[in-house]
Image (cartoon, grey):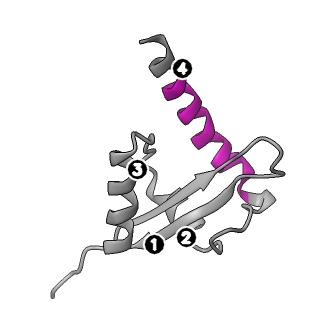
Amino acid sequence: MNESKPLKSASAVRYKPGDYAPRIVAAGKGPVAEEILNIAKKNNIPIHVDPDTARLLSFIEIGKEIPQELYEVVAKVLVFVSAIDKQYMQK
């Protein structure tokens, strides 16, 4: 039996002051996911690895706010990013 490895998923979330909720600004699987990760790395954007969250976010249309049901999940990602930002500012 030839088992195939599941495609990598990636989503990019942006929150700007004044937004009601974070928005999906990019999402994809396979080569598109790899490109999202490459762009993030090139621009020193923190990457949070959580396949389950990436899969959930991949169902949201680009440009749309995340639904209320995912606030808690995305809040964990934003806490991670905030911690990275604080470490960066202390250097």
The answer to which quarter of the image holds residue 86 is top right
Of helix, strand and loop, which one carries label 2?
A: loop
Q: Residue at x 42, y 48 (%)?
A: 49
Quadrant location of the C terminus in the rendered image? top left
- 32 sits left or right of 74 in the view: left
Q: Nearer the viewer, mark 2 or mark 1?
A: 1
Mark 4 or 1, nearer chain start: 1
Q: Give, as a single range, the part of the protein colored magenta.
A: 70-86
Q: Which mark is residue 86?
A: 4
Q: CA distance from mark 3 to mark 1?
A: 14 Å
Mark 2 or 3, nearer chain start: 3
Marks 3/1 in contact by CB < 8 Å: the verdict is: no
Q: CA distance from mark 4 to mark 2?
A: 28 Å
Q: Residue at x 33, y 47 (%)?
A: 42
Marks 2/3 in contact by CB < 8 Å: the verdict is: no
Q: CA distance from mark 2 to mark 3?
A: 17 Å
Mark 4 or 2, nearer chain start: 2
Q: Which mark is residue 40?
A: 3
Where is 67 relative to 85, above or below? Answer: below
Q: Is residue 14 visible?
A: yes
Q: Name the residue tied to disc 1.
A: 28
Q: Residue at x 71, y 52 (%)?
A: 22
Q: Which mark is residue 58?
A: 2
Residue 82 lies in the magenta-colored region: yes
- The x and y percentages for residue 69 are 76, 59
Of helix, strand and loop, which one carries label 4?
A: helix
Q: CA distance from mark 3 to mark 4?
A: 18 Å
Q: Viewer-proximal residue, 88 or 55?
A: 88
Q: Amino acid at mark 2?
A: Ser
Q: Amino acid at mark 1?
A: Gly
